[in-house]
Amino acid sequence: MSGKKSAFDEMHGKGGKMRPPYADYSNWLHAMSIDELDRRHKSADSIFRRSGITFNVYGAEGGVERLIPFDIVPRILAAAEWDKVALGVCQRVRALNAFLDDVYNDQNILRAGIIPADLVLTNEAFCPQMLGMKVPKRVYAHVAGIDVVRVDEDTFYVLEDNARTPSGVSYMLENRQAMMRLFPELFASQRVAPVNHYPELLLETLRAVAPGGVDEPKVVLMTPGQYNSAYFEHAFLAQEMGIDLVEGSDLYVDDATVYMRTTKGPRRVDVIYRRIDDDFLDPLAFNPGSMLGVPGLLAAYRLGKVTICNAVGGGVADDKSVYVYVPDFIRFYLGEEPILSNVPTWQLRKPDDLAYALAHLPELVVKEVHGSGGYGMLVGPAASKAELAEFKAKIKSSPESFIAQPTLSLSTVPTFVDKGIAPRHVDLRPYVLTGRETVVVPGGLTRVAMREGSLVVNSSQGGGTKDTWVLEDAGKEAGHARARR
Amino acid sequence: MRLRIRHETRYRLAEPARRAVQYLRLTPRQDRCQRVLSWSVSGPPSLVPWTDGFGNRAHVASEVEAHDALTILVEGEIETNDTWGILPLDDGLPPPMFLRPTPLTLADDAIRDLAKPFAASCVGTGTVPTLHQMTGAIAERVVYATGSTDVTSTAAEALASGKGVCQDHAHLFIACCRVLGLPARYVSGYLHSERSEMASHAWAEAFVEGLGWVSFDPANCQSATDAYVRLAVGFDYAGAAPVVGLRSGGKGEDLSVDLSVEQVQSQSQSQQ
């Protein structure tokens, strides 16, 4: 679909004047021939094939693995632009953690009427097994991916929060590696804030939330296995952190303690960085049909013998029906005004909002409350009459399952496509870590809709990725915005 | 009422298992209607007490050696009070979360049809009498018959077959309450009764504004009395089951259960 209004281009701005963060890059680009770019583009492809970065696409034939398109034109943010985003996403994650701690313990926010109690308590993602539990450092969303979109020079919106098991950070790391190999001259002439310390920060985060009294915690990464779409990332991160990559069958519980089977006998496990959904963690407590989990894990967890990252039940904070209230969480828990705004959202469980949305469907984006990955989504301006009618019926049969938002004209960044360099819409997912404090590495994953005019950036829907540069101010260590708890 | 309970569960396996892990919800809850005088759970080589999110006092039992037998022995005495089937809202569990349907308690058209006639009178002071009527209707539609269903049977399946046990009655009651917009939950426990097949029992509780949690036992068409001992609450059987477990390997399970729930005369107090 195409935005009706012309989109804000991050390189050329609105008036076609080169924006400062892109000045150096643009000079370099103009000196390059398309043939040379094409040659480097092709070698990028072979770098990724060799490194084995692939992504399973659900619904594709036989779960085939394919490369996510990588674009060789970086997305560039000035230090000041990034600082605002960084402070904003860190603030948001601090509020999400405070919310989770509250709803699973005192429930002050429900009593205060800031968010309707039923919306939380009857939410499928609300996990009663977390009630009354104190998790280490009161952190639930240790790793959060906050999706941010930009619509003009000064306006960034948070599109959605991902507080369960956000993926994609391996692309952030691999994209940077690839760019440094392909275009070393660019990194020599500009100060691009590094991202390669992410695995180190992640491990530090995981160690910081180990059960009390454990000095040298044993940390493992738990994957559902090689058929998971993000298995490559699981293996990659485990290797980068130097920790064991395990599946449920490698772990067992005895004496309410989690052990890993090793060739040298059982080894106690203190922290599990799990990349597996809540439902599959412990077949005795959750989905009984799951063969992926560890029987007894919930008991060990509730007894504080092991820390699970992210915490169980975090989904109630990133649900799209709860998203609407996150700015209120920031005011309620932190006493601060939100640095980043939400996209205006109609909650279709409300009759007035429903009536509006049904009357304006062709202009709106409609999302399923519990959906993710761009599945079950309607982009009004791009939809056919038949699709609109079909969605209308779906909404009417279950209004509470949907929210609607205006179709935002996402910013564009020049992108290398078949016809040469052309603008394509992008979003940004910074990865926010919370252990001892809340931190974010400068940049994140820029996702780009490779099809002309498309606003859907999800890799499952044909989106690609770009390296994201945060330029450091000369003389100032910028981009390392750290929001202290 | 003072009750003495002895509950022994023995598993024998024709082919040994390598490992086993179980959650046992076999310790009475700390609720207003009951006071534990003495209680012990024993048997498995490792047994660690924990409290689940619903406030149920559970144990995690594990056996990491190969084994062809496992015994769980529960013994204790408990003093119960008759609270007219009503428990105050003091257990920290917010009622609205018990509006959530689960696979075992999902309402189908037949369940909705069963519940709907009670909707009009299920308001204000009419709520409790109406729920008693609904309990009677459930007992009529689903006849108590042991062995007619298993632990995976849903409320909808029990209603369709017209036969079930206390677990199915409780699921059906919960499903009907949720149709009426009333939070309802599953209770597993012990029952002192002449019908020994009901010594290990299940019933349900509905949340009635102004009263609290009110119990309904469709299998016996009554509210809970001091003959009932509450072990665990949950959305349904899956969350409140007295024993759930998984083992690796092992075949040919032979399960035997000895359970007695006896009233102890008050004189016995002075004999101790």
Image (spheres, coloured by chain):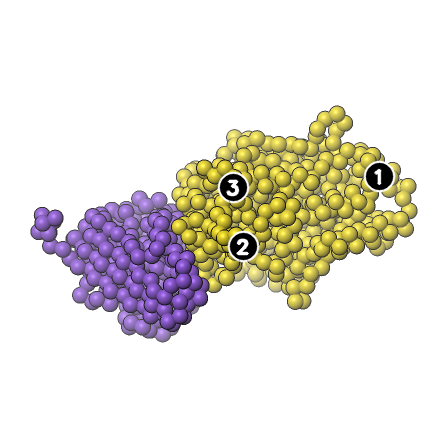
Residue B103 shows up from this direction: no
Which mark is nearer the camera, 3 or 2? 2
What is the count of numbered marks?
3
Q: Which residue is mark 1?
A: A185
Q: Which residue is mark 3?
A: A217
Res. A263 mark: 2
Residue at 66% x, 60% y is A57
Which chain is mark 2 on?
A
Residue A403 lies, in percent from the top left, at 57, 51
Q: Residues within 10 Å of mark 3 (few under 14, many from 20)?
A: some
Q: Is residue A75 above or below residue A370?
A: above
Amino acid type, residue under disc 2 in the picture = Thr
Residue A55 lies, in percent from the top left, at 68, 57
Residue A271 lies, in percent from the top left, at 51, 45
Mark closest to the chain's N terminus, 3 or 1: 1
Which mark is nearer the camera, 3 or 1? 3
Mark closest to the chain's N terminus, 3 or 2: 3
Amino acid type, residue under disc 1 in the picture = Glu
Label 2 secondary element? loop
The CA distance from mark 2 to mark 1 is 47 Å
* Residue contact between numbered discs 2 and 1, judged by CB atoms under 8 Å: no
Report the front residue among A174 and A471: A174
Amino acid type, residue under disc 3 in the picture = Pro
Report the front residue among A216 and A351: A216
Which mark is nearer the camera, 2 or 1? 2
Q: Is residue A154 left or right of residue B267?
A: right
Question: Are the residues flagged by discs 3 and 2 from a single subunit?
Answer: yes
* Residue contact between numbered discs 3 and 2, judged by CB atoms under 8 Å: no
